[in-house]
Image (spheres, rainbow, N blue to C red):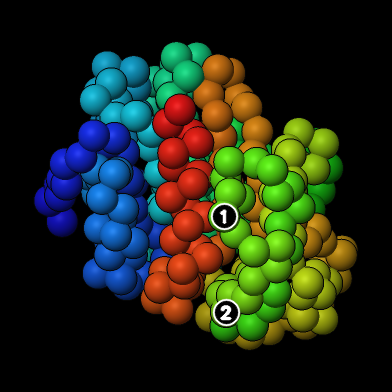
Amino acid sequence: MGLIRYQSDLSVLVSIKGHPFDLTAFANIFESFPEIGHTLVEQPASQSFLNPESAEPYDAIVFYDMPGIDFSTQPPGFVAPSENLKRGFMDLLSTGKGMVFLHHAIAGWPLWPEYGEVIGGRFFYGPTECRNQPVLDSGYRHDVSHNVRVLDKDHPITAGLDAKFPLTDELYLYEVFEDSVTPLLSSNYTFDREHFYSAHQAVSGNMFCNNNWPHSEGSPLIGWHKKHGNSRICYLQPGDGPTTFSSPHYRRLLKNAILWAAA
């Protein structure tokens, strides 16, 4: 896929790729934001923009990608980022480039702990260590109809949203660093092993399985904001497919997040 650019007064770089998704439906979200120009670039090509010089034309960066995971093997292999990439990315945070991470982006660069600290949480495809503690692989559940509750009604990211609104989307049972994020959204779904499936089982060829997976109860947070370096950071867990992409609630939420990150 080549670079696709749409012009407007405000400009964002959108890094894409990861688990399969409907590119046309996803791009249509951004095309519905006339005040936000956007450039879609697939991984790994988008990595070349992750430094202050190359990212200078953009007011913010949106991540809908999953770098550092090689899905050509089963289970997948993990790839560490280069030192040059890490240095450029951290320099971006020092310069204050706003960033919005969506859905599966929280699984990116599993061998780079600092990346999870930037986002405010982690999704793991295998048992590992997180913040010096052993953890199991994360959980997933597709097509969950649930209610989203706005926890901070006065924040610019949630401006104009109802106090509670419905979504049907994939949810995660994942690691949330609640001590370093400011909550924005929670879900009324039940975040325990009985209601999710093991990600490691899924990528090992055994979909929709939670046998021998004693995952602890997880956080209901599905949206937050924080600061890392000098940059505004927002993570929004929803965003699996066209049903969510077409939701007016989700579109308002994403537009608000981009405008806030770029401010």
Give the side of residue 128 with respect to residue 132, left or right: left
Amino acid type of the residue tagged 1 in the rendering: Gly
Q: Amino acid at mark 2?
A: Thr
Residue 168 falls in image quadrant? bottom right
For the C terminus, give its image quadrant.
Answer: top left
Compared to residue 188, the image places residue 87 above or below, namely above
Against 150, is 209 above or below?
Answer: below
Residue 72 in percent (x, y) is at: 37, 64
Residue 262, picture quadrant = top left
Q: Nearer the viewer's eye, disc 1 or disc 2?
A: 1
Q: Which residue is mark 2?
A: 168
Mark carried by residue 160: 1
First-in-chain label (1 vs 2): 1
Label 2 crowd bin: few (<14), some (14–19), many (20+), radius 10 Å: some
Q: Is residue 149 above or below residue 212?
A: above
Give the side of residue 46 with respect to residue 97, left or right.
left
